Amino acid sequence: MMRLRLAMVQMNPIVGDLQGNVRAICRWIREAKKAKADVVVFPELAVSGYPPEDLLLMPQFLRDIYCMQNRIAKVSHGLMAVVGSVADPHDLQGAIMANSGYMEQTERSKPLNVAWVFADGRVEGMYAKHKLPNYGVFDEQRYFQEGKVNPIFCLGSVRIGINICEDIWFADGPARTQVKYGGAQLILNLNASPYHIGKTQIRQRMLAARAKEYRVFVSYTNMIGGQDELVFDGNSLVFDPRGQLIARAKAFEEDLLLTDLQIPQGDNHDPKGLSMLTPSQKNAGISFIHIPWQPSPVNLQIPSIATIASSMAETEEIYRALVLGVRDYARKNAFSSVVLGISGGIDSALTALIARDALGASNVVGVMMPSPYTSLASRQDSKSLAKCLGITLLNLPITGLFKAFLRQLRHFFDGRPVDTTEENLQARIRGILLMALSNKFGHLVLTTGNKSEMSVGYATLYGDMAGGFAVIKDISKMQVYQLARWRSEAQAPGLDQVGIPARIHSRAPSAELKANQTDQDSLPPYPQLDAILQAYVENNQPKSDIVRSGYPVRAVQQVIRLVDQSEYKRRQAPIGIKITGRAFGKDRRMPITNRYFPKV
């Protein structure tokens, strides 16, 4: 047996910050060296950040990425470094192309999503991603060409197969080829896998199955951090050849995961096939790249490193994802503070609490904007919330402004009954005030609408939808209550004992835009509403199936009609953090102009 110390760097890059990302990569490589690592692995597209989207269509961006190679190579002495990046076929060096088997198997039109392999101060080769996802939030076929070859990196006598993200999800994909035809003993999979509910368990089951089936070590190095609506959760993993989990990195935090692998001793110092390949290996795109390495023999007196970070319950995962999403969206877009409307309701209370945990209480400004219909309880609860959270609370009454608008419009509205127009005026006045505070003081405006409201259009364009970032846009109303209860009772690392006042949890939800108003005047009860939305939006079920599940026909028809009619609003809403497997936006894309109304 030989001991190979694997370092997996769960880093948080910023899209487009090539200099900063490479500085971080070099710093992590130095840390891995101090830890006596033999191999250090980084996430997918660590150099560019993920997803770079149409930056990849800019030739200068690709050239600037290429110029980062030498900086990484210079710090690669003493170990093998595997770094996710982009390769433009126009810029690739002939020797690297030939070594990795790409000379005759690439087009010149699109770049490649690659893992660069560095050792001894130079680029030794690369692997290009084969499977390019083109669903949900992924659009990789727009930007990349498929890789077609399978270089095997022989670190001394250890054969290592490298692949990227989607590649490992296919049972008959590149990993299988690398094991079957290249004799790989260790698979290194680089990832930028965004979080959604249930994703961590799905990954673990799949990776365990791959490791057991191929009878090899499998490592899965994932990115962390927020990027627009996406949040990457980390949770990097290592499985042994029996399919047993032997190491797991932290969730939602940068981490350097060190794992000692006991690799069977083989006679591969000059691997068979290094100069002569079998026909089967040639057809499989196999090539061998040899990197000198002196393994450490397994010494039973020295304990091996293998850390399994504790897993999180689903509610904590969701909450941590929201906090990280807010923190990174603000930080990466140069906002140091946020402002939001505080209504005395549960949605704004949860949003304020998330912002406080993300940015600190001193960087959160709440604004209470009472109208003629704002209850005394709402005023009191807003003050109690601000005191509990330690955030600033401004009081900007809108009654005078509302009356001024009504006076201005009185002649034009004469003879027409009061309706939602007057309700929406109040919401839009509040939006103007929040945007004014944002402009003057540089705050990021957070909106407070939840997914249940966004689904059925229970929100006002240019009013409560006005802002820069929608924190709970993908969180249903019932999940809002669940998260608020969990955070108020949480005994979790890094979270202090602070909560939302009890009365906010128990009061009936209301927009308070007219007298004695509650949400349930216009909508089905939230438990029923959320269940219908889950079936229609998340599970894509037809009306007939939802009705057969036991929900009232009229409620199902109402909810589906409202969802379909509100697409134009959602298109104009600020982006928000993706939490579910089918978030509005990139996951669910419906035409605004649409006359398809299927019958029950």
Image (tube, rainbow, N blue to C red):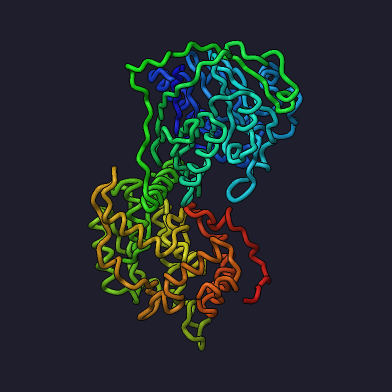
Q: Is residue 221 visible?
A: no
Is residue 3 in view from this perspective?
Answer: yes
Answer above or below: position of 164 versus 481.
above
Look at the picture and state if 494 lies above or below 450. Answer: above
Q: Is residue 515 left or right of residue 68?
A: left
What residue is at 26 percent from the left and 72 percent from the top? 377
Picture coordinates of residue 57 (x, y %)? 66, 38
- The outermost residue toward the bottom is 415
Residue in the image at 51% along x and 86% along y? 416
Residue 330, image x and y in percent?
42, 45
* Image position of 453 with respect to 269: above or below: below
Looking at the rendered image, the quarter that the C terminus falls into is: bottom right
How many numbered tags mark residues here?
0
Left or right: where 110 falls relative to 555: right
The residue drawn where x is 43% and y is 42% is: 334
Along the line of sight, the residue nearer the viewer: 149 or 569: 149
Residue 70's x, y, as percent? 56, 18
In this view, the residue in front, 279 or 381, is 279
For residue 253, side relative to residue 539 (left or right): left
Identify the image quadrant of residue 277.
Answer: top right
The residue under the point 45% across, 76% down is: 524
User: Is 143 above or below relative to 79?
Assistant: below
Q: Position of residue 322 (x, y in %)?
A: 41, 50
Examine the image and state in which quarter residue 102 appears.
top right
